[in-house]
Amino acid sequence: MNPNCDGIIITQRVILMKLEFEAVPVSLKPQIYEYLTISGVEFLAGDYEPSMTP
């Protein structure tokens, strides 16, 4: 299975409001936030701010 599939499936659940962003595992939050941003619905992440590492 493609490792990105889990992220896409979780993102879809967040968009469909079946899962709150706060319930997303910490290790997946940056990836899910990126997918939400690409989809134009980053507001679903609430106050989450991805860490900026160089």
Image (spheres, grey):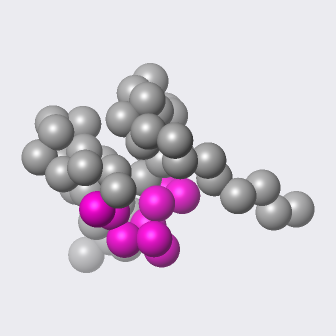
Residue at the extreme front of the image, as rendered = 47
Up the image or down, 6 lies above or below 47; here it is below
Q: Is residue 23 visible?
A: yes
> Residue 50's spot in the image, x, y percent?
63, 52
The residue drawn where x is 11% and y is 46% is: 18
Left or right of 13 on screen, residue 37: right
The residue drawn where x is 33% and y is 51% is: 21
Q: Quadrant of the N terminus?
A: bottom left
Q: Is residue 15 magenta?
A: no
Residue at the extreme right of the image, as rendered = 54
Q: Main secondary structure of the magenta part?
A: helix
Residue at the extreme left of the image, as rendered = 18
> Residue 46's spot in the image, x, y percent?
44, 39
Q: Is residue 12 visible?
A: no
The residue drawn where x is 24% and y is 36% is: 15
Up the image or down, 20 lies above or below 54; here it is above
- Which one is nearer the viewer's eye here, 17 or 47? 47
> Residue 27's spot in the image, x, y percent?
48, 74
Q: How many marks?
A: 0
Left or right of 16 on screen, residue 49: right
Residue at the extreme top of the image, as rendered = 40
Q: Which residues are magenta?
A: 23-31
The residue drawn where x is 42% and y is 42% is: 45
Q: Quadrant of residue 10?
A: bottom left
Up the image or down, 3 lies above or below 7; here it is below
Q: Quadrant of the C terminus?
A: bottom right
